[in-house]
Amino acid sequence: MTEQLLEIKDLYVGYKTYRGTSRVLDSVHLTVNAGEKVGIIGESGCGKTTTMKTILRILPTNAVIQKGEIRFRGKNVLRMGKNELNELRRKHIAMIFQDPTAALNPVFKIETQLIDIIKSSGEHESEKMEEFKARCMSLLKEVALPDPERVLDSYPFQLSGGMRQRVCIAMALATPRYLLIADEPTTNLDVTIQDQILRLIKDIVEKRRLSVILISHALGAVKGFVDKVYVMYAGNIVEVADTEELFSNPMHPYTKGLLDSTPKLTGGGFSEGIRGRVPDYVNPPTGCRFHPRCDYILGKCKKEKPPFINVEGDHGVACWLYYKK
Amino acid sequence: MVMGKAENILVVKNLKKYFKTTFGTVKAVDNISFNVKFGETFGLVGESGSGKSTTGYLITGIYTPTSGKILFKGQDISVHTLKRPKNMKKDMSIVFQDPASSLNPTKTVKDIVGLPLKVHGLANNSSELTEKVAQLLEAVELPPERFMDRRPRDLGGGEKQAVAIARAIATSPSFVVLDEPTSALDVSVQAKIIKILMKLQQKLKMSYLFITHDLSLMRNVASRVAIMYLGKIYEYAPARLFFHNPLHPYTKMLLSSVPVLTDEEEALKPKDVKSMGEVSSAINPPMGCRFHPRCPFATKICKIKEPGFALMEPGHYVACHLYTKKR
């Protein structure tokens, strides 16, 4: 049952800038099993999107993959050639982006863009227009778009934000058979639409038995969706646990800080937040990258990077506070 | 329902703002009334396009109302800001959603925070100006010596918003409109900005109109809450009643969509309404109750007649036929 689908080991990625190399990812490791729903949480600028873009190898040109391994179904993605990569992107892994307006081409109708994707997947049986149209219709129906015929005949600007995101989901579903990466899929949407979209993605993923990685900084959205949560800070995975365990028993000071600063519907106020901000990656802090913002700092934290250890069962954390136990 | 009593710093009466576009008239704010009491935080929630920011802009005079009245400390101010007396403008300010675009990128923090002081003649010479800016920066927890001469591009999102807040309180106003002041920020930073805002409110005895789409945040900051949908207010209540006994189906739908972390929060979410449909166009809003196309309880009357307000409990008003029928 627990067949490993994706494994990231010791990944280092940097960006070349005029000030020097910005060392963003600093030993990231992550596993996704077949059929598993995984969440990644963390502030903006923590390297969540960089990690996902590395999986698909769609990083900008100034990015450098310094070290590491990404195994997808046993094959190392970092060593794949162009053809293999294209096949990976077309058939196996799909990504839903944060901003559906930017993800769709503004000058083509939805129909043209959807058919393009179906064609490039090489899954179609014939070149007949009717067949393509039928596929499009069934995809749009799967994402619960009302009036799919009108949508097919529309340009992106004629649709609302929620509808555009549904179209993007339909595109992502046109092919992948293993993994769906949803990078903040609801950040630009209203709460009521966010709720609908998340329910939709969850339904489809479960129906098709896909694995999914959901990135978000809305902690509540992640909690209601995934089986396992990774907490990311400044290019490190600082904590991982099953969803229930992580939210009821957070260990890393950063995770605690995030949870405490989230306002609750029940009222009663919230903490002062986490002081400072995400570090500069050209000159990241020595030792634990969180130490300048941490309230529980030990002497060691400034000098040595904490190793990632399993504390209880599958609950892992990278923090010196838990090292002795 | 709303009276111009002396306990209110701001009274909004039958306020309307229509925008003419090539596709028709957008009724961004359509006949809303509410009041803000001295020293309280009045919350305005709603989704994008509900007219909550337009309301904030009308109050601060960025837009001129199509009709209706805005009374500030008893004085009618339903005109554009250019026509308002200067000492009144001093008494009211606004913090915008996106600090990256509300701060002039070419100016230093000192210029930005010092401008309102100069305009209103609150600093006689440059050393007094520097001193006052330093005090303001300290009030928003930015060490003046480090921030005074920096420019917006050198600041993080939270720091930028803190500068925008310092600018807003520079003239010691008694009323501030906060238009989604933290929605562009991460939660850890949001918490800090909110704490600063709450402290300042206590210290300077300010009243806030707090505009946000984030209900969890609203629960923690507002004393009274009004909910807007397509330019109209549909329910308003003291914050506790609003969250513990939501009545309007739209309020329930919004609450049921909020992603939450704890079981206690989950228990607060209404179970009888699930989010469906999308906000209708503001150009041709639905007849009758504007929420009826998305409402699971909609009946014939909802499509024809606009619901009036009914008082359900002390201070708790709702505009919905479900409740007016019973009386």
Image (cartoon, coloured by chain):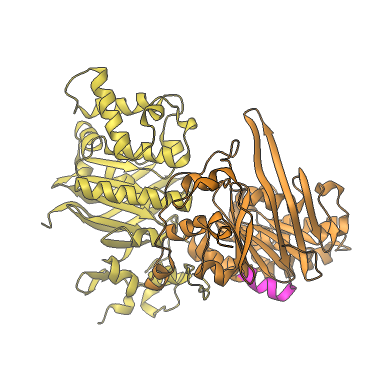
Chain colours: A yellow, B orange
Specify start and end residues of the magenta stretch as a single range: B196-205
Place of residue A171 in the rendered image (x, y in percent of width and height, measured from the top left): 31, 35
Q: What residue is shown at x 45% (from left), y 72% (from top)? A: A260
- Specify whether residue B197 is painted magenta: yes
Q: Work out whether B3 lies above or below B63.
A: below
Q: Is residue A4 visible?
A: yes
User: Considering depth in this image, is A217 or B153 the residue closer to the camera?
Assistant: A217
Q: For residue B157, what is the image quadrant?
A: bottom right
Q: What residue is shown at x 59% (from left), y 66% (from top)? A: B193
Place of residue A99 in the rendered image (x, y in percent of width and height, measured from the top left): 44, 42
Residue lying at the far left of the rendered structure: A1
Tell whether A87 sits left or right of A142.
Answer: left
User: Considering depth in this image, is A206 or B167 the residue closer to the camera?
Assistant: A206
Q: What residue is shown at x 59% (from left), y 63% (from top)? A: B327
Q: Work out whether B158 lies above or below B68.
A: below
Q: Work out whether A95 lies above or below B39.
A: above
Tell whether B271 sits left or right of A272.
Answer: left
Q: Main secondary structure of the magenta part?
A: helix
User: Which part of the image, by quadrant, shows the N terminus of chain B?
Assistant: bottom right
Residue lying at the far bottom of the rendered structure: A325
Q: For residue B317, what is the image quadrant?
A: bottom right
Q: For residue A26, what is the image quadrant?
A: bottom left
Tell whether B315 sits left or right of A92.
Answer: right
Place of residue A9 in the rendered image (x, y in percent of width and height, measured from the top left): 22, 56
User: Considering depth in this image, is A224 or A21 the residue closer to the camera?
Assistant: A224
Place of residue A17 in the rendered image (x, y in percent of width and height, measured from the top left): 45, 46
